[in-house]
Amino acid sequence: MYSARASYVTAAVETAAPAKLVTMLFDRLLLDVDRASAAFERGETLEGRTLVQHAQDIVAELMASLDVAAWEGGPALMSVYAFLYSSLVDAALTSDVATLASCRELIASLTATWHEAAELAVAGTAPAAAATPAGAGLLGIG
């Protein structure tokens, strides 16, 4: 069945600049964690775990796309992603809303940072862009 919304989302993702794509992933990551927490609080464990699994998939994609050698902060960011992934696994296994709340705090901070970096990239004022190897893009993405 044709879905106009699905077509729109697909087109938006396929045409997004790398920095914008990362912000889109983080926005969805926040949404997944919020929805999972609400599901766990309602006692809907299966739904909550499905949403946390999607959040884990997003973090795995962020890890896979990060070039840790592209900038000096790369290894530290990879460590943050690994910690977040592990915490999400723990939250899913235990249906722990408190662990998800801690994850959400970390994700919210990262989301704000990525949005700011994306805005700087669009404006052409990103100081990190000049320090990355040719073709690496902002913060090692792209």
Image: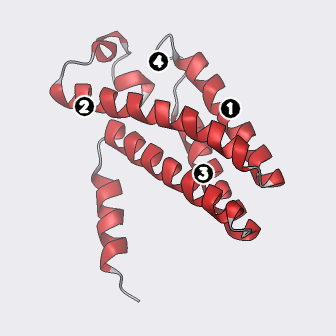
Q: How many marks can you see?
A: 4
Earlier sequence position, callout 1 versus callout 3: 3
Mark 1 is surrounded, within 10 Å at the Cα level, by few (under 14), some (14 to 19) or many (20 or more) other residues, namely some
Depth check, front residue: 59 or 130: 59
The residue indicated by pointer 1 is 82
Measure the alpha-carbon separation of dots 2 and 3: 24 Å
Q: Residue furthest left?
A: 123
* Residue type, numbered disc 4: Ala
Q: Which mark, by number, is residue 119?
A: 2
Reply above or below: 141 against 96.
above
Could you tell me which quadrant the C terminus lies in?
A: top left
The percent position of residue 62, horizontal first and vertical second, equals: 54, 39
Task: Give the residue type that dot 3 points to.
Answer: Ala
Q: For the N terminus, give its image quadrant.
A: bottom left
Q: Which residue is mark 3?
A: 55
Residue plotted at (57% across, 32% down): 106
- Residue drawn 29% across and 48% down? 16
Identify residue type, mark 1: Ala
Q: CA distance from mark 4 to mark 1?
A: 18 Å
Name the residue located 43 percent from the left edge and 24 percent from the top edge. Answer: 140
Disc 2 crowd, CA 10 A, few/some/many (<14, 14-19, 20+): some
Is residue 119 positioned above or below 95 on the image? above
As helix, strand or loop, the secondary structure at mark 2 comes to helix
Under mark 2, the amino acid is Glu
Q: Is residue 40 left or right of residue 93?
A: left
